[in-house]
């Protein structure tokens, strides 16, 4: 499967970039489906797609000037797992104070996981 921005939850199994327009407000990201609005994250689920490789999954804000990577909005370490029976990691973000206006997700490709992001506009 590839990234799906048109659903709630958002499904990401391939790193996103500004250069390819797959950041949230990019032409091939969430803006193509929801317009140029931000989201309020409510829950994240990180699920192994098979054997995983240890690494960091990061969600970074994109700065409004120049489209460069800004502050880290969320980060988690994925442990090495040898099979698909590894447990998904779930994070409750209900009540998070700030919305995410534009962001990229990195590390999912290298770690071999999928990220599901439940949100409200």
Image: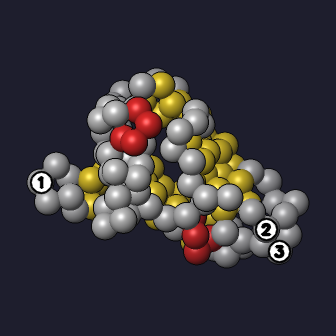
- Gap between marks 2 and 3, in whole Å? 8 Å
Query: Which one is in front in this view, the residue at disc 2 or the one at disc 3?
Result: 2
- Alpha-carbon neighbours of circle 1 within 10 Å: few (<14), some, or many (≥20)? few
Residue 54: quarter of image:
bottom right
- Gap between marks 1 and 3, in whole Å? 42 Å
Left-right relation of 83 to 110:
right
Looking at the image, do the residues carrying marks 2 and 3 touch, with CB atoms under 8 Å apart? no
Query: Regarding mark 1 in the picture, which secondary structure is present there?
Result: loop
Q: Position of residue 10 (x, y in %)?
A: 56, 42
Residue 9: quarter of image:
top right
Q: Position of residue 99 (x, y in %)?
A: 35, 32
**Residue identified by numbered label 2:** 50
Query: Which one is in front in this view, the residue at disc 1 or the one at disc 3?
Result: 1
Q: Which mark is residue 82?
A: 3
Looking at the image, do the residues carrying marks 2 and 1 touch, with CB atoms under 8 Å apart? no
- Gap between marks 2 and 1, in whole Å? 38 Å
Position of the C terminus, as image quadrant, is top left
Q: Which mark is residue 104?
A: none
The answer to whether residue 49 is visible is: yes
Position of the N terminus, as image quadrant, is bottom right
Task: First in sequence, mark 2 or 3: give its number.
Answer: 2
Depth check, front residue: 64 or 20:
20
Q: Residue at x 41, y 32 (%)?
A: 34
Q: Which mark is residue 65?
A: 1
Residue 96 higher or lower than 17, as above or below = above
Query: Regarding mark 2 in the picture, which secondary structure is present there?
Result: loop
Task: First in sequence, mark 1 or 3: give its number.
Answer: 1
Q: Position of residue 5 (x, y in %)?
A: 51, 44
């Amino acid at each position: 499967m590839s990234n799906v921005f048109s659903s709630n939850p958002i499904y990401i199994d391939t790193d996103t970039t500004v250069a390819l327009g797959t950041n949230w407000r990019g032409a091939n990201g969430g803006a193509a489906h929801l317009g140029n609005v931000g989201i309020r994250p409510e829950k994240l689920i990180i699920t192994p797609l098979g054997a995983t490789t240890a690494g960091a999954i990061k969600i970074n804000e994109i700065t409004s000037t120049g489209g460069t990577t800004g502050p880290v909005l969320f980060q988690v370490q994925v442990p090495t797992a040898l099979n698909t029976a590894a447990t998904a990691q779930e994070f409750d973000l209900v009540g998070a104070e700030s919305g995410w206006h534009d962001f990229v997700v990195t590390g999912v490709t290298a770690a071999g996981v999928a990220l599901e992001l439940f949100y409200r506009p």
